Image (cartoon, helix red, strand yellow):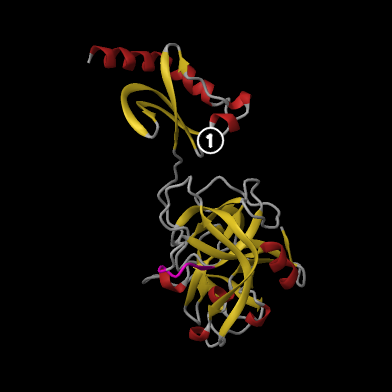
C-alpha cells in the first residue's frame, strides 16, 4: 500500500509535465495513471499510461515518436485506446457526415452515407452511396426524396429530407452505386463520423492495404484488402432485379483490432479509407454468416465508381 501511495504521489507531481510531453507526440488519445500491462496481461505495477489509436511494434515506430519508458522515475506504458462522444450515426446529423444513416423515403431503403463528391454533369455536390441504399429497388425514380437518418431509423420523428435521387449505375454494370444531389439547405462534410478523419482524395485498392470505415450500424471498423479485381455473385431478386456478377475487392477483418464484425446490414454504402485519409472502396456487401472464412466484406474500387458515375472528389 505504501508503494502504491508513493507511486500515486509521483504521478500527481509529474502529471503536468507528462501532459506537456504527450503533446509532442502524434496520435496520443489520452494520458492517465493506472495498471501497467505486459504481453496483454495486467500486472500489479502502476504507472503513467500513454493512450494511442494504434499500438505498433517498436521497430515500426520512428525514433522521434518512441515514447519514454519512464518519466521522473515513474514507469510508463503505452496502451491502445481511442474515444468518441456517445452520439449516434442513426440520429439526425448536422452537418451530414460520412458514415451516418441515409435512405430513400419512398422506397423505405436505409444504409450509410459514403462520400460527398462533385457530380461532373451538374457541377453540384452529391451524396454517394449504394444503389440498394439510395434507390432501394427497381421502382426508384430520379427525384425520390433522400432522408437522413434513413427510414429504418426515423422512428416517430418527421422525415428530414437532405437530397434527391439523381442517377445510378445499372446493376448490369457490376456496380451497386448511386448519387443524390444535396438540397441547397443541407450542410455536408467529408468528415468520418465519430473520428478525426477528414477524407480527401482517392486511391486505388491494393492487396495488404489497411483501411477503416464508419458504418451506420457497426460504426468504426478496420479491415485489410485481401483480394482485388474480383467478380462476386449477389442476388438482387428481392429488390426486383436478379442475381448479378458484381465487381469489387474483398476486405477481411484486421486482426490487430478487436471488432467481431466489420460490416452488417445498414453499413451498405460506407466508404473504406486508407491511412492517408483517401477514399479507397465503396462497401456494398458482407459475409453471409455461415462461410468458414468470415469476417469479410465486399467493396467497389472507388476510382472505378468515380469514372462510371462521372464524379470527382470535392
Using the image as rendered, state which of residue 256 and residue 64 is in the foreground. 256
Q: Is residue 183 at least partly visible in the picture?
A: no
Q: Residue at x 61, y 78 (%)?
A: 245
Which residue is situated farthest in the front direction here?
292
| Residue 151 part of the magenta-drawn span | no
Q: Is residue 286 left or right of residue 1?
A: right
Question: Image height check: is 41 above or below 272?
Answer: above
Report crowding for label 1: few under 14, some 14 to 19, many 20 or more residues within 10 A (C-alpha): few
Using the image as rendered, state which of residue 242 and residue 33 is in the foreground. 242
Q: Which residues are magenta?
A: 285-290
Q: Quadrant of the N terminus?
A: top left
Question: Image height check: is 205 above or below 255?
Answer: below
Q: Is residue 240 at least partly visible in the picture?
A: yes
Q: Is residue 289 left or right of residue 248?
A: left
Question: Image height check: is 76 above or below 250?
Answer: above
Q: Provide residue 276's location: percent of width, then percent of height.
A: 66, 46
Q: Residue at x 52, y 25 (%)?
A: 22
Q: Disc 1 marks which residue?
A: 56
Q: Is residue 173 left or right of residue 69?
A: right
Q: Provide residue 279's location: percent of width, then percent of height.
A: 65, 56
Q: Residue at x 50, y 69 (%)?
A: 111
Tag 1, which secondary structure? loop
Using the image as rendered, state which of residue 285 and residue 19 is in the foreground. 285
Q: Provide residue 130's location: percent of width, then percent of height.
A: 58, 71
Q: Quadrant of the C terminus?
A: bottom right
Which residue is situated farthest in the left direction here?
1
Q: Main secondary structure of the magenta part?
A: loop
| Residue 286 part of the magenta-drawn span | yes
Amino acid at each position: 500500500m505504501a508503494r502504491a501511495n508513493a507511486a500515486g504521489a509521483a504521478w500527481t507531481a509529474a502529471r503536468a509535465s507528462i501532459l506537456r510531453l504527450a503533446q509532442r507526440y502524434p496520435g496520443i488519445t489520452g494520458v492517465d495513471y493506472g495498471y501497467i500491462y505486459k504481453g496483454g496481461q495486467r500486472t500489479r505495477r502502476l504507472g503513467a499510461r500513454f493512450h494511442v489509436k494504434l499500438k505498433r511494434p517498436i521497430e515500426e515506430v520512428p525514433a522521434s515518436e518512441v515514447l519514454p519508458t519512464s518519466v521522473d522515475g515513474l514507469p510508463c506504458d503505452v496502451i491502445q485506446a481511442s474515444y468518441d462522444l456517445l452520439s449516434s450515426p442513426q440520429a439526425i446529423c448536422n452537418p451530414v457526415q460520412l458514415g451516418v444513416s441515409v435512405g430513400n423515403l419512398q422506397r423505405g431503403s436505409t444504409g450509410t452515407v459514403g462520400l460527398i463528391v462533385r457530380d461532373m454533369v451538374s457541377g453540384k455536390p452529391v451524396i454517394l452511396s449504394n444503389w440498394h441504399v439510395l434507390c432501394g429497388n427497381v421502382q426508384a425514380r430520379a427525384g425520390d426524396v433522400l432522408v437522413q437518418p434513413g427510414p429504418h431509423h426515423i422512428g416517430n420523428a418527421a422525415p428530414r429530407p437532405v437530397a434527391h435521387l439523381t442517377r445510378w449505375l445499372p446493376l448490369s454494370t457490376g456496380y451497386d452505386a448511386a448519387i443524390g444531389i444535396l438540397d441547397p439547405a443541407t450542410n455536408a462534410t467529408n468528415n468520418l463520423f465519430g473520428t478525426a478523419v477528414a477524407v480527401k482524395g482517392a486511391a486505388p485498392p491494393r492487396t495488404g492495404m489497411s483501411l477503416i470505415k464508419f458504418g451506420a450500424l457497426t460504426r468504426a471498423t478496420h479491415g485489410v484488402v485481401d483480394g482485388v479485381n474480383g467478380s462476386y455473385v449477389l442476388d438482387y431478386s428481392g429488390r426486383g432485379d436478379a442475381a448479378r456478377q458484381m465487381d469489387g475487392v474483398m476486405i477481411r477483418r484486421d486482426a490487430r483490432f478487436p471488432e467481431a464484425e466489420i460490416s452488417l446490414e445498414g453499413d451498405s454504402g460506407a466508404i473504406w479509407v486508407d491511412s492517408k485519409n483517401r477514399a479507397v472502396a465503396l462497401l456494398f456487401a458482407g459475409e453471409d454468416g455461415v462461410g468458414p472464412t468470415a469476417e469479410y466484406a465486399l467493396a467497389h474500387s472507388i476510382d472505378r465508381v468515380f469514372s462510371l458515375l462521372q464524379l470527382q472528389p470535392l
